[in-house]
Image (cartoon, coloured by chain):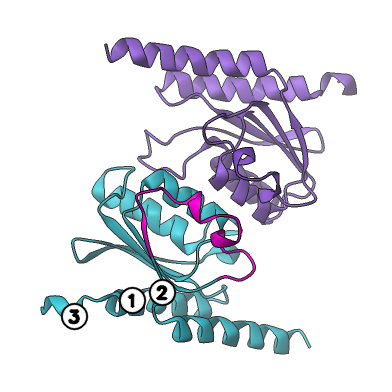
Chain colours: A cyan, B purple
Amino acid sequence: MDIDFLSHEYFMKEALKEARKAFDEDEIPVGAVVVCNNHIIARAHNQTEKLNDVTAHAEMLAFTSAEEHIGSKYLKECTLYVTLEPCIMCAGAAYWTQLGELVYGVADEKRGYNLVSKKLLHPTTHVTAGIMHEECSMLLKEFFRQKRMQNQ
Amino acid sequence: MDIDFLSHEYFMKEALKEARKAFDEDEIPVGAVVVCNNHIIARAHNQTEKLNDVTAHAEMLAFTSAEEHIGSKYLKECTLYVTLEPCIMCAGAAYWTQLGELVYGVADEKRGYNLVSKKLLHPTTHVTAGIMHEECSMLLKEFFRQKRMQNQ
């Protein structure tokens, strides 16, 4: 496989596939993948409704799965791709993993960690924002549009 | 049972029992219980080493267990007793639960959420700090003293 193919967009599309699973399950559509050495080692989507559990954000489930995969609490060599900017809880978890890189799609203007401080992440975590933000944003907007219609 | 018995100290002692389980399992000794209507509905201790998972803090496991118990994502009528001040991740999770009350033992001078902002919690969450802080602190100090000796 051509190494150029494994771009940020390539992996964000995989995170979007996860987000669409959440959408189809009537969950707020956020998806994530964890990538290590150009391989996806964990996939997850938001399951807070299904599991009745606020901690079941896509990022948290992806971290747990990735840690299980590599047998370590630390994800220093890994990149998290997530369709929505992490919240404070997920940024706090990313800190503990010493995550190598965070790539997210669309900013969360209500609960994104950057609203508190960019320093919630580990100082060694590299951040790239805005990858495929249109697609990530549209999925969320469509979800909440449908929710509003259902509630009318 | 005399209602006076069910004081903050009573429930913090239960959280300390959990912390001692963590100590005995060679985990950083932090314990938590979730209380609703004077009943303990969840107990947990830190299991980050055993589970190889940074998200396995006592508070996170206690939230998940309490949510399962009451069948809701929200813990508005509940109190979390935890021996150590929550970190940013756990404070972020507490926000999502809309936790009624947080009672903690000893402040975490390195990673406590108050170092960032008291506002990481939900605005309706009542906070009481310093309950049995000596006992909570001593257990942590003894753990790290033993760790230093092992590493010498």
Q: Is residue B151 left or right of residue B20?
A: left
Residue A14 bears which disc, if any? 1
Q: Position of residue A97 (x, y in %)?
A: 38, 47
- Disc 2, disc 1: CB below 8 Å? yes
Chain under disc 1: A
The amino acid at mark 1 is: Glu
Instruction: Name which residue lies at 50% across and 67% down.
Output: A85
Residue A78 rendering spot, x and y as whole percentages: 28, 56
Chain hosting mark 3? A
- N-terminal of the pair, mark 1 or mark 3, is 3
Q: Where is the N terminus of chain B found, in terms of image quarters?
A: top right
A65 or A123: nearer the viewer: A123
Q: Quadrant of residue A54?
A: bottom right
Q: Is residue A125 or residue A33 the one in the foreground? A: A125
Q: Which residue corresponds to the image point at 42% horizontal and 12% vertical from the top-left? A: B145
Residue A58 belongs to the span the image colors magenta: no
Quadrant hosting residue B49: top left
For label 3, the residue is A5
> In the picture shown, does residue A61 fall above or below B80?
below
Q: Nearer the viewer, mark 3 or mark 2?
A: 3
Q: Both on one chain, marks 3 and 2?
A: yes
**CB contact under 8 Å: marks 3 and 2:** no
Q: Is residue A110 magenta?
A: yes
The magenta-colored residue range is A108-127
List x then y, in percent, for residue B128. Answer: 77, 32
Distance from label 3 to label 2 (Cα)? 19 Å
Dot 3: what SS?
Answer: helix
Q: Earlier in the sequence, mark 3 or mark 2?
A: 3
